[in-house]
Amino acid sequence: MLKITDLTAGYGPVTALRGVSLTAEEGRITAVLGANGAGKTTLLRTISGLHRAESGTVELAGQTITRVPADKMPALGMSHVPEGRGVITELTIDENLRLGGLARGRVKAEELNRIYSLFPPLDERRGVPAATLSGGERQMLVIGLALMARPTLLLLDEPSLGLAPRIVTQIFELLRGLVNDEGLSVLLVEQNARSALSVADHGVVLNLGQVVADDSAATLAADDQLRHAYLGF
Amino acid sequence: MLQFTNTALAGLVLGMIFAAFALALVLIWRSTRILNFAQAPMAVLTTYIALVMIEDGQSYWLAFVVALLCGLVLGAVVERVVIRPVEGKPDINAVILTLGLFIVFKSAAEVIFGTKLRTYPPSFGVRGVSIGDTTIGITTSDFFTIGAVLATMAVLVALFRFTDLGLKMRAAANNQEVAKLLGVKVGAMLTLGWALAAVVGSLSGLLIASGGLVQPSYMDSIVVFGFIAAVIGGLESPVGAVVGGLLLGFSLSFVSG
């Protein structure tokens, strides 16, 4: 689904990614793990075109998208959910969701209803500005509006950040359901390695911009040395 | 009673003129989150284009439309050439640039068109409307001004509230990065916001000039009140801009009698 080869990116003199290669398989959840500053967020931003790659390639379903600008990605089937619950705070829940669907043309009522049935708490507050939502509701909304574009690949940046463990579990269960039932592929960036590996099929560990481990989630979770050295649990 | 009516009507017309200018400010704020101090001299330039055409014997309404189109192009060009390079920098940079543009455009108008006062013909009649035997202090030109401002307000409300385009423009103004990730062409939305705001600004220039005297600084007195009207209305809302303009227009009219 997504194939990244030898990707390098940075901020001026600081290199954040040093030749990162990884793949996210179709119909799977691939978790990218690592500490603060490992390059996880830069990786997602470079994939989605918000940040410029210095070298290397990104391929989505066989098509090279390394230099495609971010605003073209939803139409190609890739939605990026940024860190910090990126919603348009001024717009209502309904307007946010409609906006999410516009990348694929006209928004139909049944598509909106599908998202509301996935996230019942949002349904009760359709006309409310997104600025007034709680952290958990906002995370639901941001995933919901990414799903409105009917993506085949979802990039998720730290969905667990600042949320109660119960809500994190809910969100991960929902992702698992979408992957199993609808064949969605997910590239999940997480600092919370324990929960991420519990939901993911595959894991990639980044340290200082380099891949230090790339294996099935179960193997990574069982590797005590790796867990102590990089994952902190 | 007649004097009261006439004072109120004068306030109404004055308020609508402030509102026209305030609408342009609201539009650019809503779609790009900056204030455009160069709005007035941009409108002066386009009004002069219309005036030159009229003096040249062209029809009033052809000149009117051409001025609005020139506003559209001028707004888009200013955004692309002047504002785009400071995109993503602190907002104050763009605002200071518009202050610079204020001086540049005003000087340009003085150089190109001269500082002499020139008469701008009225859109419609300049006689007071008669009801029975009494002539009241409102003209058919004033009716056109009021109608044009209310229509512009209605179009802007509809644009932002009911259309997909308005939704994208609001998203681009509120959070550029998130908007981009949702597939909104943020650059195009900002250019469009500037272009539309300059059209509304040009309209206000034409309405103010109509039936009066024009020189490169003829809008200066309106600018301050237009800003106040926009701020009273909360800078966000087209309806607020009109309400703010009317409040100000009535106050000024009744205070000065």
Image (cartoon, coloured by chain):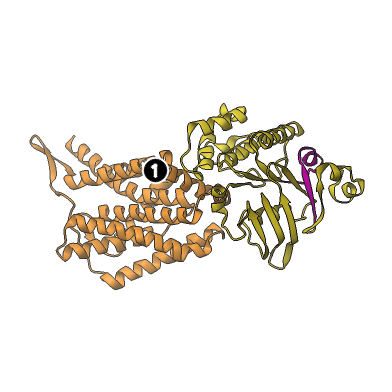
> Along the horizontal axis of the image, is B120 left or right of A112?
left
Which quadrant of the figure has residue B7?
A: top left
Q: Secondary structure at mark 1?
A: helix
Q: Can the viewer see residue A157 in this picture?
A: no
Q: Name the spot of residue B181 as percent of width and height, x first.
A: 57, 49
| Badge 1: chain ID | B
Q: Position of residue B94 (x, y in %)?
A: 49, 61
Q: Quadrant of the C terminus of chain A?
A: top right
Tell me if residue A127 comes above or below residue B143 in the rendering.
Answer: above
Residue sitting at x 31%, y 64%: B45
Q: Is residue B147 above or below residue A23?
A: above
Q: Residue furthest left?
A: B133
Tell me the colour chain B is drawn in: orange
Using the image as rendered, state which of residue B76 and residue B112 is in the foreground. B76
Chain A pictured colour:
yellow
Q: Is residue B57 above or below residue B32?
A: below
The stretch of residues the image draws in magenta is A188-207
Q: Residue at x 39, y 69 (%)?
A: B104
Determine the image quadrant of residue B81.
bottom left
